[in-house]
Image: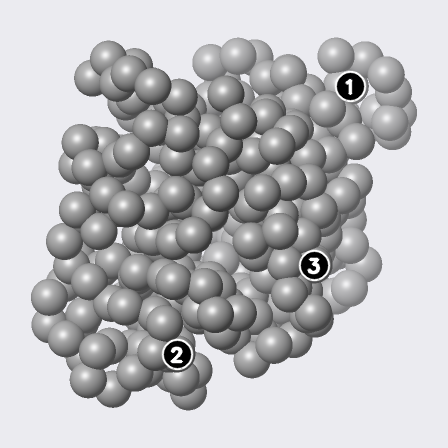
Amino acid sequence: MTPRAINKTAVIGAGSWGTALAKLLADKGEQVVLWGHDPSHIDALRRDRENRKYLPGATLPKTLHPVNNLNCVADCQCVVMVVPSHGYREVFTSLIPHLKDNTHLISAVKGIEIGSRQTMCQIMESELEQVSRGGTMFIGVLSGPSFADEVSTGQPTAVTIGFIDKSAAEATQLLFSTDFFRVYTSNDIIGLEISAAMKNVIAIAAGISDGLGYGLNTRAALITRGLAEITRLGVKLGANPLTFSGLGGMGDLVLTCTGSLSRNRTVGLKLGEGRTLHQALAEMTMVAEGVKTTKSCFNLAANIGVEMPILEQTYQVLYQDKPCRQAVQDLFKRSLKEELTRSEFE
């Protein structure tokens, strides 16, 4: 079935990234609703025309309509999910009764659910099957190196949107593309989702390294070997290896491991400087997806038998109180091996 034309979009999640994407579309003149769970927050968005809590300084256009009722998706041809992974399933399940057939469903969330070890697109597929939802839905993912603050101010940015259906990919590519926001297409949904989730884990490790006072050599090693781990996991799950050298892979990994706006790198930085995980999270106002994703990816890798030493050490720091410096030392004490052998990715 051919996707219908996109005349109205619902962005579900009024945090920084959801607001930035909604503003991007509204600035183009698109009709957009932005849903948030907190009525008082939505009232503030309507009153101030600004998300002062999560994206201060970005003016919300008149074509952007903040709402707090999930029936807002009923007349939308595109629904963009931007809620944290731990609440994703509950919110998506609640909006299913309001969806129209032939809707584009896009995940812009970078995480894996802990209990099920499912990606966000897999959650949408499974929940639609659970309720025996009739009709066709087009499920995809938006990913790539894109800090919300920079997108909201029109900084040149390139991302990738993934759909199995080519016409759905092209329709949403056209919807999101602007003269500063360039969108590429892909059909490798699992590759994009694994990259998006795991790069946050590696960013925590990179932040730990920086917090410990290690230099650029160490950070470069973590990024490179982190990409090898991400690729191993993704290929095992059926991803295209080329995805990991693209915007959703290497591009997003480099940004998140090095950028000062990275929440996950910030968590790692605080840990490396000596704070506990509880202290580090208490000092932040926004969700660092990599903390929960470390646990879900650790369980996923163990379940399917993929060796991921950086992930393992990060897990031990976060959930077993392992000293950060000891984790780095243990990575370098591992038995020596050849780099980039074919067997490493099989």
Q: Which mark is residue 344?
A: 1
Q: Quadrant of residue 248?
A: top right
Give the foreground label among 2 and 1: 2
Place of residue 46 in the rendered image (x, y in percent of width and height, measured from the top left): 21, 78
Q: Position of residue 6 (x, y in %)?
A: 46, 47
Tell me the number on the disc at residue 61. Answer: 2
Residue 345 vertical position relative to residue 46 in the rendered view, above or below: above
Left or right position of 135 against 204: left
Q: Position of residue 258 (x, y in %)?
A: 66, 64
Amino acid at dot 2: Pro
- Nearest the viewer among 23 and 103 is 103
Q: Quadrant of the C terminus?
A: top right
**Does residue 9 appear to the left or right of 5 in the view shown?**
left
Type of residue at label 1?
Answer: Glu
- Of mark 2 and mark 3, the one earlier in the sequence is 2
Is residue 249 placed above or below 308 in the rendered structure? below
